[in-house]
Image (cartoon, rainbow, N blue to C red):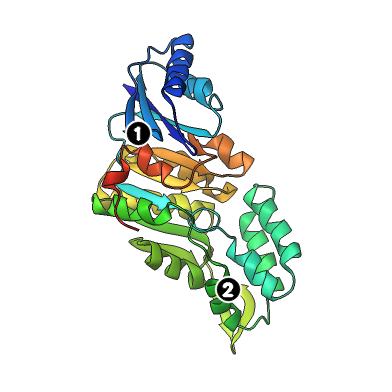
Amino acid sequence: MFIATLIAVEGLAGGDISAARDALADAGLAPGVGRWVERCYASDVPFAGDPVAARAALEGLIDKVDVIVQPEEGRAKRLLVADMDSTMITIECIDELADYAGIKAQIAEVTERAMRGELDFEGALDARVALLKGLDAGAIDRCYAERVKIMPGAKPLIRTMRAHGARSVLVSGGFTVFADRVAAEIGFDRAISNTLEITAGALAGTVRRPIVGAAAKKETLLAEIATLGIAADATLAVGDGANDIPMIETAGLGVAYHAKPKTAAAAAARIAHGDLSALLYAQGYARAEWAEA
C-alpha cells in the first residue's frame, strides 16, 4: 500500500482531501479514507496502484500544498543525508563571502548556473574561490554571524529524527568553516564539506583536494547505508542543486527542496511550498512528537 501525504502551508480542509481522493480515483488508483497526520495541515491518503501516476494526479492539484508519495511501510527513515546551502541554511555561503569582497553579483551568477547543472561543479567552485584570493579570513566569522540563517524546520527535522534513533549527515559542496558550525547548531551527527585554504590570515584562493561534489554526496550516502547495515529504502536525502541529484536518486526517499528545475525533475518528491518540517509529516510525525528546537 502507498500513501500520498498532503502537506499545506496555510491550511488543509476536508474538501481538499476529498479532491485528492477523487483525483486518485479518476486515475484508477483505489484511494482509501484520508487520515490526519496533523489536523488541518497534513493528511495521509492511502491508495493502491502506481505511485508515479498518483504523483502526477496530485501535484499542483491544491494551491500551496506539497504532496509526497511513497510506500506506507518504512516511511520513518533511519538515515538522512542533507545538502547545506539553500537547504539547511537559507543562503549560499560563497555568494555571501563574495559580498564582503565586493563581487557578489559576479560569483552568484556562476553559483546559480552550477546549481542548475549548466557548469561543471568542481571547475565552477575553483573559479569562484580563486576570485576570493586575498579576502581577509575574518570575513568568514563575520559572514557566519551576520548572514547564516538556519532554514525553518531544519532543527525540528534533525532533532526529531535523532530522538527516534535516526542518523543524520550534512554533506556539502560548501566549506567546513560554515558546515561544521551549522551541523553542530542543528544537531547533525557528522558533517562533510570542502576546506578553504588560508594563508597568512587571508583566503589563498584554493580548495583542498579532493573536492566534495556530486559523487562524494552519493558515496557518503552509500557508505552510511553500509555502516548502518540498512536498506536504501530506509534513507532520506534532501537538496536543491544539480550536485544533489545522485544522492537524491539513490535514497529511498529523495527530496528536491525548493530546488532548481533539473533537480526537481530528477527527484521522486518535491517540497516547493513548505519548509523542512514537511519531511517530518512525510514520515508520519505529528507536531506533538517533534523534538524541541
Residue sitting at x 53%, y 72%: 144
* Amino acid type, mark 1: Arg
For numbered disc 2, what is the local secondary structure?
Answer: helix
Comparing marks 2 and 1, which lies closer to the viewer? 1
Question: Percent position (x, y) of residue 270?
Answer: 51, 37
Please tell me which of labels 2 and 1 falls first in the chain.
1
Question: Percent position (x, y) of residue 228?
Answer: 26, 50
On screen, residue 208 above or below 246: below
On screen, residue 117 above or below 72: below
In this orientation, which residue lies closer to the viewer: 158 or 203? 158
Crowding around mark 1 (Cα neighbors within 10 Å: few <14, some 14 to 19, many 20+) is: some
On screen, residue 128 above or below 240: below
In this orientation, which residue lies closer to the viewer: 276 or 216? 276
Residue carrying label 2: 143
Question: Percent position (x, y) of residue 5?
Answer: 40, 30
Question: Percent position (x, y) of residue 108?
Answer: 70, 60
Residue closest to the far bottom: 200
Residue sitting at x 38%, y 57%: 155
Q: Which mark is residue 39?
A: 1
Residue sitting at x 43%, y 51%: 153
Q: Are marks 2 and 1 in contact (CB under 8 Å)?
A: no
* Amino acid type, mark 2: Cys
